[in-house]
Image (cartoon, rainbow, N blue to C red):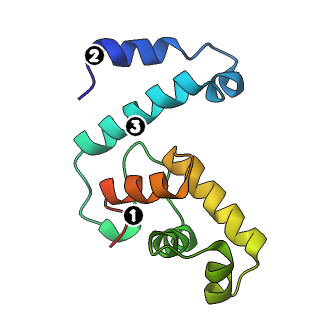
Amino acid sequence: MLADRQILRAKLYVPRGRPGAVARSRLYRRHAGRLLERFALESPRSANVASRQVPGIEALSDREIEVLSLVAEGRSNAEIATELYLSVGTVKAHVHHIFGKLLVRNRSQAVARARELQLLD
């Protein structure tokens, strides 16, 4: 659990009017990720699990969930593209959006975060 002092410190890193510059800062991403995890894990989940909505985390689309499940199986972008009848570029875009929504940097972190948040079956 994060201490309230750490939450306050994370909030202080958000200067008004410059969200783009702050979002690129490594320190902000670390604190923002922890904050979102805390709120997601402490908030009661809704009964509608099919929506895949977790408080504090932007909802993944059905296609992104589908791509994420194939990523979790260890499939490459080319394999995912073949299976879903997409271009490799489209799969890369989906993976990039998943990373942004889950606040992660790579595939293994995305799968780990999705499992923590119970987004994968």
Q: Amino acid at mark 1?
A: Arg
63 versus 6 height, above or below:
below
Question: Mark 3 = which residue?
Answer: 36
Tell me the quadrant of the picture where the C terminus can be found.
bottom left
Query: Which residue sits at x=45%, y=47%?
Result: 57
19 lies left or right of 3: right
SS for callout 3: helix
75 versus 114 height, above or below:
below
Mark closer to the chain start, 2 or 3: 2
Q: Amino acid at mark 3?
A: Leu
Question: Mark 1 = which residue?
Answer: 52
38 lies left or right of 82: left
Spatial distance from mark 3 to mark 1, Cα to Cα? 16 Å
Tell me the quadrant of the picture where the N terminus can be found.
top left
Assess whether mark 2 and mark 1 are in contact (beta carbons under 8 angstroms).
Answer: no
Q: Amino acid at mark 2?
A: Asp
Mark closer to the chain start, 1 or 2: 2
Question: Mark 2 = which residue?
Answer: 4
**Mark 3 neighbour class, 10 Å CA radius: few under 14, some 14 to 19, many 20 or more:** some
Spatial distance from mark 2 to mark 3, Cα to Cα? 14 Å
SS for callout 1: loop
**Mark 2 neighbour class, 10 Å CA radius: few under 14, some 14 to 19, many 20 or more:** few
Mark closer to the chain start, 3 or 1: 3
